Image (cartoon, rainbow, N blue to C red):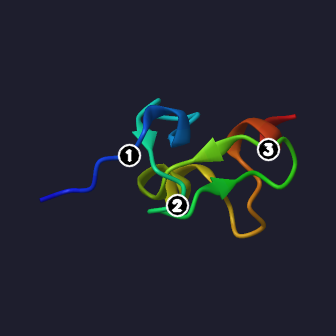
Amino acid sequence: MGRTVATHLLSICDECEDAFCPTCETPHTCSKCGRVYCGDCAGKVLDSENVCDLCRED
């Protein structure tokens, strides 16, 4: 059975907009703008220097 987490402890992924628990799953953060990504999206959005697609386009 999964854990129950209070909604005020959840983070929202800036890519897929799914809620995730940052104490259960390490949030991945863009080192340039600070956007937060879940583990599923981080590999698709962040490069090896933890810079997101949006910041790379700037």
Q: In this figure, which residue is indicated by the disc labeled 3?
A: 34
Question: Which is nearer the eye, 45 or 39?
Answer: 39
- Could you tell me how many numbered marks the image carries? 3
Circles 2 and 1, Cβ within 8 Å, touching? The answer is yes
Q: Position of residue 17 (x, y in %)?
A: 47, 29
Residue drawn at the location 68% of the way across and 61% of the way down:
47
Quick one: label 1, few (<14), some, or many (20+) residues within 10 Å?
few
Amino acid under label 2? Thr
Along the polypeptide, which appears first: circle 3 or circle 2? Answer: 2
Q: Is residue 31 above or below residue 54?
A: below
Q: Disc 2 designates what residue? A: 23
Disc number for residue 5: 1
Between 33 and 26, which is closer to the camera in this rendering? Answer: 26
Point out the tag, 1 or 3, that comes first from the N-terminus. 1
Residue at left offset 48%, top offset 50%: 41
- Dot 2: element: loop
Type of amino acid under label 3: Gly
Coordinates of residue 38 in the picture (x, y in percent): 50, 50
Q: Nearer the viewer, mark 3 or mark 2?
A: 2
